[in-house]
Amino acid sequence: MTHSMTPTMEEKKANSLSSPDIDTLHATPAAVTQGPFISEGLSTSLPISALLKQWEEEDRLTPLDRHFSLELSHIHQEFSPLFLLICALLSQQLSQQHTCLPLAHIQLNNPLQEKISHCQITCSRSELTEKLTRFSAIACLEPAATNKPLATNKPLAMSQPLAEKTPLSLIQSPIILDKGYLYLQRYYQFERQVSQQLNRLARDNAYSLNADNIDDIATTLNLLYPKQTSDVNPAVFDWQKIATATALTKKLAVITGGPGTGKTTTVTKLLFLLCLQHASNIEKTDAAPLSIKLVAPTGKAAARLSESIKASKLRLKAEIKQWSTDIKTINANKTYPYSAQQHLTALAQVPEEGATLHRLLGVIPNSHKFRHNENNPLRLDLLVVDEASMVDLPMMFKLLHALPSHARLILLGDQDQLASVEAGAVLADICAGLAEQANNQWRMRYSPAHAQVLSQLCDEDLSPFIDNTHLGDTTTQQTESNIGDSLCMLMHSHRFKGDAGIGQLANAVNHSNKQQIKRVWQAEHPELCWLEHQVHSRGNLGLTTLLEQSVAAYGRYLTMVHNQLQSSDTIIECFNEYRILCAMRSGEYGVEGINQSMTQALWRAKLIQPTQEFYAGRPIIIQSNDYNLGLFNGDIGLILPDKNRNNKLMAHFIQADASLLSVLPARLPQHDTCYAMTVHKSQGSEFNQVALVLPVNPSPAQKQLLTKELIYTGITRAKQHFVCLGSEKVFEQASLKATQRASGLARRLWGD
Ligand SMILES: Nc1ncnc2c1ncn2[C@@H]1O[C@H](COP(=O)(O)OP(=O)(O)OP(=O)(O)O)[C@@H](O)[C@H]1O
């Protein structure tokens, strides 16, 4: 079995489209097609092949899950119904963006959670583990305590348990069982290697502190973070300062926090500090200038990162200009090595242009591989990745492998947002070892050495946060992992004033605090508006109000379209001030239904003329990547008359570098109308005003998707005003439901 049998979900989907139906491909043995079946720790009321088909028809499995199970069983000539069931369950986990299947999560009595179970696993979990290890297609990794030394370098016979430290190249089974977690080999590799790389980066120091430089750095940090402007209460720690010191000294820094907590401000100050330090090194050693790259998962997020860094640099420039008196005072006691001009030069060296992760790694058309990888590493010294919560496990693997060994990595993001669209929840897993305490405070877990460095640099006593209990992945490394040293949690939002409704509501939802959610809505904050679904025979009053509000909001950019006085950039900016976000794709209250209702409402208001597919003012969202055109899934543009082409209608997009791209509508890749978009697709974007639409009577499948992360992400897309069309019950139920993504990454980073 080669790696190609353990494709990523993208590859699996692509393959499934071209493959004929599995039933017609193979002659299937009786064990699979005959039943009822009672043996080998499994009892089924129908043959397993019939059950897989039934579960597919009931939408419990995807066609891909069933194909995968049957295909694997044929390739490995393993026709045990238990094997087929387990393969289908594992594939189902991946379809639902989990990276593995913890055996503890399998409901033995009713594995597919039917109303009446047609299938029961009749053995205990430990017996199940033992049975699984007997299948030739499943490699079992022994716990560390009973490791046997590897006798040979040859590929291993699969009946023999593998030692926990077995090199990945020797594991050839398509499925791996590791400490009760079942993986497809590809995902096992992703997870193990991502954890190894993160643990390595977290362990490595990026900067050697000595008696000469420690004082100067501490002084510059004091200038950057003067005591009087520290977080609200001067008695609490200035976590932005601590984050800057962490990112300066460690190769990995993970700076997380909600909107407006100062992630960009902090990283700008760090980059300034690094450029300042590096400039003095260049003078001494003739070293090359630092190569720093800023990236984000989507074009929109990359553009926002550029804007935020530019704004942050302007603010810092103003602050630096105020430092002259402070520097004179400092120099009265000792020699501070940097002049005001050196500060300004260093700030000017901080890069501003963001790019997408895809562009950085170098897309190869029609391939899932990138130009940059471990054999062709990126040429950079420091990489900042914004919106890291959107980065899935396979992408993080590719990114970490393309990073040169000397480079630093800074991940910025909000761990409470929706997890990535593809498998994994990497940012949440990295943060999983910290426990939140009262008042939004986090209990940091520093190694003694790092706590001492931070205390010295920040002039704070951080010894209360020393914690030696986390060990991380012991499979390949000799020393402890200190992932806790690399974590920086920013807790105080500077954007929403402490009492602002949007911030309070986001916070209450994030903490699933039912009473607080009620209190915030009852307080009638001017920046919050609740619209209750009021469904009558003649329609839904709540929806009517939302459409009226939306016609007024979108009317602003559509009037500009008609007047033809403003540039395309200005019109797109105006369009981006307001957005309707839907929890669901389909249905009357999903993206499809709301886009239809909006199109009709705008037509009735004579703001658009949708008589043909592409009409002036139609907003579109791209649904698939087109590397030749430079358009990517999630890019949003407007159909507008192009003055340079005799007012011909063209699709206009603002790209990550703020330039305008215009494309013939006929050449557009797959796309949809975008008056409304899903909350998922809105990640990485912010709008002055947001309207969130929840379904009236969600189906059980829809309820699964209605989570607190989805509501939190929807609320936090709004900067000034947030409207919610929904019912109290649905809002509350969703706010109480937290997403769980099965993954072994947190365990590998933090230990069991
Ligand atoms: N320590 C601070 N004191 C006062 N204001 C601050 C502080 N840190 C940041 N701000 C202000 O808060 C606002 C948001 O900061 P910033 O853009 O750095 O946050 P962010 O976490 O990157 O936000 P987002 O999640 O939207 O990207 C900015 O106006 C910034 O000037």
Image (cartoon, grey):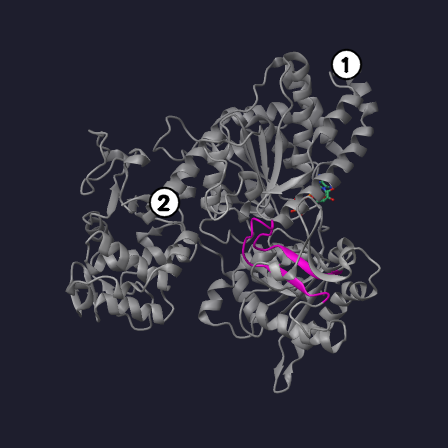
Question: In the rendered image, is residue 64 in sight?
Answer: yes
Compared across the picture, whether 530 is left or right of 25 comes to right
Q: Which mark is residue 333?
A: 1
**Compared to 174, does 167 lie above or below?**
above
Alpha carbon of mark 2 to alpha carbon of mark 1: how far? 59 Å
Question: In the rendered image, is residue 509 in sight?
Answer: no
The residue at label 2 has a CB less than 8 Å from ligand 1 = no
**Compared to 668, does 270 lie above or below?**
above
> Where ligand 1 lies, by quadrant?
top right
The residue at label 1 has a CB less than 8 Å from ligand 1 = no
Compared across the picture, whether 268 is left or right of 403 comes to right
Q: Which mark is residue 687?
A: none
Q: Residue at x 30, y 73 (%)?
A: 116
**Compared to 670, does 594 lie above or below?**
below
Magenta region's main secondary structure?
Answer: loop
As for residue 626 lying within the magenta part, the answer is yes
* Residue 61, position as x, y percentages in the image: 36, 64
Which residue range is magenta in the image? 616-641
Q: Residues within 10 Å of mark 1 (few under 14, many from 20)?
A: few
